Image: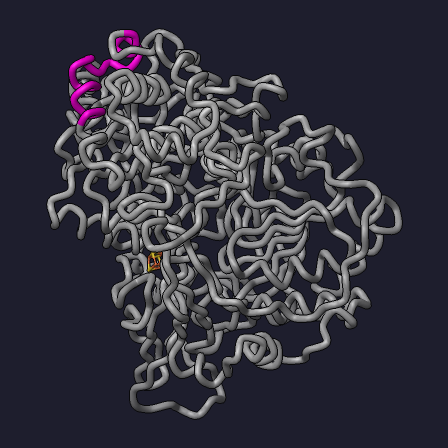
Amino acid sequence: MSASLSRRRFLQVTGASAAAAGAFGALPRLRAAGRPAETGIRTVPTFCDVCFWKCNAIATVRDGVLWKIEGNPDDPLSRGRLCPRGTGGVGAHFDSDRLRAPLLRASVRGEERWTEVTWDQALSHVAEKLQQIKARYGPEAVALFSHGIGGTFLRHTLKAYGVVNVAAPSFAQCRGPRDVGFELTFGEGIGSPERTDIRNARCLVLIGSHLGENMHNTQVQEFADAVGSGATVIVADPRFSVAASKAKHYLPVRAGSDLALLLAWMNVIVGEGLYDKDYVAQHGFGFEAFAADIAPWTPEWAYPETGIEPETIRETAREMARHRPATLVHPGRHSSWYGDDAQRSRAIALLNALLGSWGRKGGFYQPASMSVPGFPYPPYPKSEKGKVDNPAKRFPFASEAITTGIREATISEKPYPVKGWVVYATNLVQALPNEAETTKAIQNLDLLVVVDVIGSEIAGWADVVLPEATYLERHDELNVELFREPFVALRQPVVAPPHDQKPNWWIARQLAVKLGLEAYYPWKTIEEYLERRLQGAGLRLAELQKKGVVRGQPQPIYYEDGVVPDFATPSKKIEFYSVQLKEAGFDPVPRYSRPAQGPPGSLRLLFGRAPVHSFSRTQTNPVLSQAMSENEVWVNVDVAVRAGLKSGDRVRLRNQDGVVSNPVRVKATQAIRPDAVYLVHGFGHTSRMLRRALGRGASDAGLVTRYATDPLMGGTGMHVNFVTLEQEA
Ligand code: SF4
């Protein structure tokens, strides 16, 4: 059955003032009726929200209409330059597909029939349902799924109500395996923004990490700097990515065998005595046992697994060692691939440890942040029940909540029932693997509330949809992030929301009032809240309103500059051998086993990012849609020829479970191995509310019916699905 036709769906809005055309019709010039016409040009500093990098920016308004957004020159993140999708972020304000008013479900779940209501009606309905769930099952029966800084206030309201189950797909579906692998090795994770000193690296190693396509502004700028100053780039990837085009060594590794390659690299570096012996002796724990463990994993052993010639493995290992400690083996970000991901990430951490790059210039710096005290709220109620996502610590090294664990508990009602989901700014239908499990869980809910800017697929299933103002129309929590140098940044409204959209802080506060939780909101306006927090840091809101970002005093960020090494591991050292893994029944040193292969003739489905889109959130943005309106499927040209296909032909992808995608254009290319295909994530939308994106391209998420769960931390490896190609007539 086609993924896009798996259920009947309709889009209909009814209501007193809300003819469907009123709710979703074409937008006029976005100046609120009744407001005096504004003339001239003004600029407003704020920070971007098209992705989670949160670059500081300056927006310009001309004659009352949002005109453009550019980088803030004072910003250490963007260094005055936004990425292409950040520049196109203005389109979110003008998007004719955006949600305009609160909606209540008017039919069964799965049909997009709505009644437009007032905010008071919508929030009263939500509060009433939440109180019913609390009375019957306890507050733990409500879960919050949230992505990004905008969820801060909703999290506060729901924690005050008693919610303990709070999760984001950014852990188990994305960076979680990486962070756990590094925590097990160095005692701490990589953070976001990543603490990678790319600009000073003399050798940069990318393993399935697509810098340039995966557009995280600072990293991409630093990558360009490093390439410009002659750094050696080594790329291991089944696909010849943009980053690969800058590489001295491109290794077209077989998908799923990255861990074998990493073990062979370490085998060479240890076997030839090329590692940083002083660093390892000073900071390492269990090196001898580690060295003995990796001794069998020679380049010759790795060759049939990876497809990479032994001499190439040796040459690239020696190249890494030549530039140490300024060799950065990049940890990547989206690391949920094959189910052995925390151990693969641990192998990346260990390779960096051998090269002495953790804490060193050109490797991983020690980040710093401003000290900005939180608002003095009353304590949240305590729960006796605990959380549902990881019962009995099934995944002993999960350091954050597991989204799919909450989904599982919602279906099974074990260890206790979950009856309400509040979903903020994350399209769970595309973010979680196996859509059927997500919709099964939804059918078991008494309440599904979605707060978002656009009506994504998860909104299509919601009982209540609350339209949020875009980041260009609202205040948010302060951005006080760990980075190369401390800073604090302000998001503030540039223009007013064009319809009945509201900022998240207002929605959260009003909901708290309806729930009788006013005591948790001793502030009445967001300015009051922000001023109080900033005062704690000796700053004033007026200064942030004017500058957008205030930088703190730079601090030492490398061991060689005085940072004292501090490893929060059980041994207080870098753990080459992990006793805690051993005691928990796992390999103390990573081991490789070949991932499951697909049916004969099938191709492994890989997916990644494009520089002009974020997740599945930006496809309706008119500016970004113009830059890229649909994805293509990358197919090796020899495979394409054998199948009678050429670039531009349309095919459907059928996966191993019989799910068939929308038609998608073929990109026949030498730039991908013949055993895999590749899609940019986030396309193939099925929500009727996303008219500009509906049915455009193929959804990788729809084809991810299977996943391999990481036994250490519950991450969902999603590169374990296989497809065949079916030509469209
Ligand atoms: S990287 Fe691009 S999209 Fe992300 S916050 Fe920065 S400018 Fe915006």
The residue at the point 52 percent across, 61 percent down is 99
The residue at the point 31 percent across, 44 percent down is 214
The residue at the point 40 percent across, 51 percent down is 366
Q: In front: 394, or 696?
A: 394
Residue sitting at the far right = 135
Please provide the residue range marked out in magenta: 301-318
The answer to whether residue 344 is seen in the rendering is: yes
Q: Is residue 181 above or below residue 116?
A: above
Is residue 220 within the magenta segment? no
The residue at the point 33 percent across, 74 percent down is 58
Q: Position of residue 656 (x, y in %)?
A: 44, 16
Q: Is residue 537 above or below residue 462?
A: below
Name the quadrant of the C terminus.
Answer: top left
Q: Position of residue 28 (x, y in %)?
A: 39, 74
**Left or right, 57 with reference to 382:** left
Q: Position of residue 89 (x, y in %)?
A: 35, 63
Magenta segment, prevailing SS (helix, strand or loop): helix
